Amino acid sequence: MADAVKLDAPKLKAKDFKSDQEVRWCPGCGDYAILAAVQSFLPELGLEREKIAFVSGIGCSSRFPYYLNTYGMHSIHGRAPTIATGLATSRPDLSVWVVTGDGDALSIGGNHLIHALRRNVNLKILLFNNRIYGLTKGQYSPTSEPGKLTKSTPMGSVDAPFNPLSLALGSEATFVARTLDSDRAHLQQVLRAAAEHEGSAFVEIYQNCPIFNDNAFEVLKSAETRDEAIIRLENGQPIRFGDRAVVQSGYGLEVKDVADVDESDIVVHKSDVDDPAYAFALSRLSGTELDHTPIGVFRSVERPTYDEQVRHQVEEASAGVDRKGALDRLLNSGDTWTVL
Amino acid sequence: MNTVRQLDRVVIRFAGDSGDGMQLTGDRFTAETAKLGNDLSTLPNYPAEIRAPAGTLPGVSSFQIHFADSDILTPGDEPEVLVAMNPAALKANLPDLKSGGIVIVNTDEFTKRNLTKVGYAANPVEDGSLDDYQLIEVPLTSLTIGALEDYDIGKKDAARSKNMFALGLLSWMYSRTTGVTEDFLKKKFAAKPDIAEANIAALKAGWNYGETAESFAVQYEIPPATLPAGTYRNITGNQALAWGVIAAGVASDLPVFLGAYPITPASDILHELSKHKRFGVTTVQAEDEIAAVGAALGASWGGALGVTTSSGPGIALKSETISLAVSLELPLVVIDVQRAGPSTGMPTKTEQADLMMAMFGRHGEAPIAIVAPQSPSDCYEAMLEATRMALHYRTPVMLLSDGYIANGAEPWKLPDPADLPDLSVEFATEFNDTDSSGNEIFLPFKRDPETLARPWAVPGTPGLQHRIGGIEKADGTGDISYDPANHDHMVRTRAAKIAGIPVPDLEVEDPGDTDVLVLGWGSTWGPIGAAVRGLRDRGIPIARAHLRYLNPMPANLGEVLARYDKVVVPEMNLGQLSQLLRSGFPGTDVIGYNKVRGLPFTSNELQDALEEVIKNG
């Protein structure tokens, strides 16, 4: 449903981005926090609401567009990146966002995710990772930990999980970040960086599902453990957390006690390193056990965007062309003959 | 001086190894023939393998052309002339050759090794097995090499020009010119003038060989056909379809967005459109069929004319997204160039077996409009029709072409772009209702009472922000709704919208004095027309009609069917239109004539089948 407000100078508030639809996630769902953070972040884009489009697939997170007073499409399972690619390619005036989940993006839609990332379509992809299937009521997902007991794995899951950031980096993503549903300031800081990025921005948001996978990220949230578990990546800063630091080790990175390393050996974070190997090594610091979990922007590099290049070709070819006249010339091109 | 004999028509088939350039030879012969004003129809036939082992039966590629001094409808049932570049080509194509026809064989290739490869125990050129035909032996390869002795190219390259020698020879035999092909070769090999010159020399050598060799006592002439005045070109179905997409963009004044994934026999539409970005055509080669249709739908949402092209297996993959488009009520043109299935089937062979998939191949009640072009050039108009329906009724439309018309070619009287229909649409830009408090609001599913189409408010339109999705929505507001009565209403409304799309009445060509109607759809138009013509020439009356609109069907269809005691429905499937007619019009005596051989019907077999029904009536 539309709202009559039309602003001359865009000074919108979070409430301007709320739609008239009742939000229907389970009580305590991490999606509420993400929605509130996104709604209060969107005014920062400085865009009129009609210039923003949210596209989602299927799953709990994919209800997201209904709750935003922007243009939105709740599409089909896994396919949001395809629809968003068509929209973003044909409409450079829009800010196009994809909201997806670990099942939607990494299972059924895995193919579209990797191709959107390698093409570097100007899309902001928010992957709400709760490491479980929520909407279908509790089966394991491609990010669930091995051995997980779920409705479909009563003896424990034997699937090896994806590391979503490693996957994104392997897909040639130009922007890769991770944040937490419960840390609004950090979430918005990451959204800001994603919005500023030209091209595909991939943001993994750890999100709690209180019904089927409650406290999956508790180690990153509880006051007792979080300082030892969360690695906050800051550009230009040595990577330290708690009493520990990240240092180079062989071909990768490793966590060591600060006491055991020289200050000069601590890796200084740099998200614009051209070689994705560094960001990949960062993404491997934590597995499903989350013991050392970097959050923040892992990688942010510039590469021409797919949609811009596609448009450029069309614009260059079509500049000043009278389509009707050109059609007449096309029809009459090559071998023709006239019957009198 | 040679004898010149007049013919009114001839069917020639060029056959050789996939690497022999038979498609190019046929294409060039076609261009020269078109230039001379003959009516013509062509049938390329090539293996799915890019290069099957040389000299084997699976590697045979052929190109048939039928041309005449009057209008013709098919590429011809049986070739009267067969050019066989090797034993495999002879073996694969001889059974089709008309008894007493001309066989021109490249004797250089009839070596023991090549003969053994295809199972010839003895050389058919020598053992009398071709006695029923007019055999002409030409050492094409060595003559070509000889003709190119003075050119600075190797023997192997010289031998590759043998197809041009053959083309030159046939051009002489049938009084064709070679100028169009010479220009073509100069352009094609602009970067390699040596090769261009060698090919032209081979072409001319072939022509001169006909003129001087004693084996060619007769030269044939086929006078031009009297076609309606106008400028013509030769066109294949895929090319006409691609140009139809461009024309649809012009007629609707919308940018065109094609999402496609390569698949035989539809890929040429993607190739062609990729070359024409100057028309504001964006082409995206997506990662798969699903992404292709998804991107097209996303572009449609944004206000472009979204088009996706594929063949049966790809359409199956797109099915869920087409259903989404049904639910979203957004325009989308889905082009299915049908091929022989199921599964991979026979990718380069034709079939009409996707009609039921087009009608019903989606989950839920998800009706869409369906249009089927009847000939290669007709693809252009059919695409405009599909676009009209898609844009004005905010619905996916399936266009059902097939391999036969996609690759077949015919002369086309060029339309004038000034006569394009106005397909422009109005996007919603204003509020269209008021809420209970008197505020102006936008209802994304408030329908046009006439068309039942919903407003198309594209993202970016100020004040009309709204959300759409695959979940059932309340009519009017578009809000999520699980209300039973609303769902029933929406399902019926979407069906009524499609059923209510106006389509022209079915035209019947009835000579009188008959109670039999032959009713076809799609690419069987040519063969059925030729069969009907043949029957009438023999004084056997029969009525005929052809369905272009498969959904909705013409309003007068029931009345037409009721006029005839018997309705014969030839289809390259096991009776899909027949089934639709039987269920939709239960009183009709529908007699299916069904073959799925991957080949178009011949007009002779259809004549026999129709005559049988008429006699037993």
Image (cartoon, grey):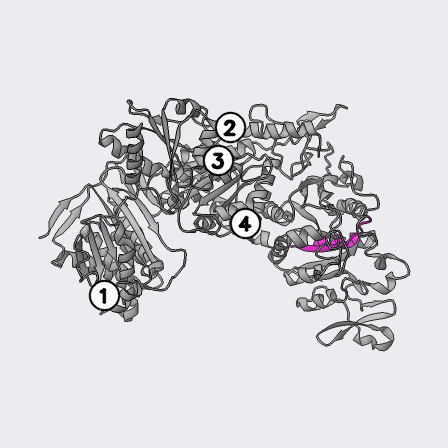
Q: Chain ID for label 1?
A: B
Q: Position of residue A212 (x, y in %)?
A: 79, 50
Q: Secondary structure at mark 3?
A: strand
- Tag 2 subunit: B
User: Within the magenta stretch, is there residue A5?
Assistant: no
- First in sequence: mark 4 vs mark 1: 1
Q: Residues within 10 Å of mark 2 (few under 14, many from 20)?
A: some
- Mark pair 4, 1: CA separation: 46 Å
Image quarter for residue B71? top left
Which mark is drawn over residue B370?
A: 3
User: Pointer 1: what residue?
Assistant: B108
Instruction: Please tell me which of labels 4 and 3 falls first in the chain.
Output: 4
Q: Of the residues tagged 1 and 2, which is closer to the observer? A: 1
Residue neighbourhood size for the residue with mark 4, other residues' Cα within 10 Å, grouped as few (<14), some (14–19), many (≥20): many
The quarter in which the C terminus of chain B is drawn is: top left
Residue B289 is tagged as: 4
Q: Distance from label 1 to label 2 (Cα)?
A: 61 Å
Per the image, label 4 sits on a secondary structure element best described as: helix
Q: Are marks 3 and 1 in contact (CB under 8 Å)?
A: no
Residue range highlighted in magenta:
A187-210
Upstream in sequence: badge 3 or badge 1: 1
Element type at marker 1? helix
Q: Position of residue A125 (x, y in %)?
A: 69, 52
Q: Is residue B218 left or right of residue B301?
A: left
Q: Secondary structure at mark 2?
A: loop
* Residue B368 placement, left or right of B462: left
In the foreground, B459 or A280: A280
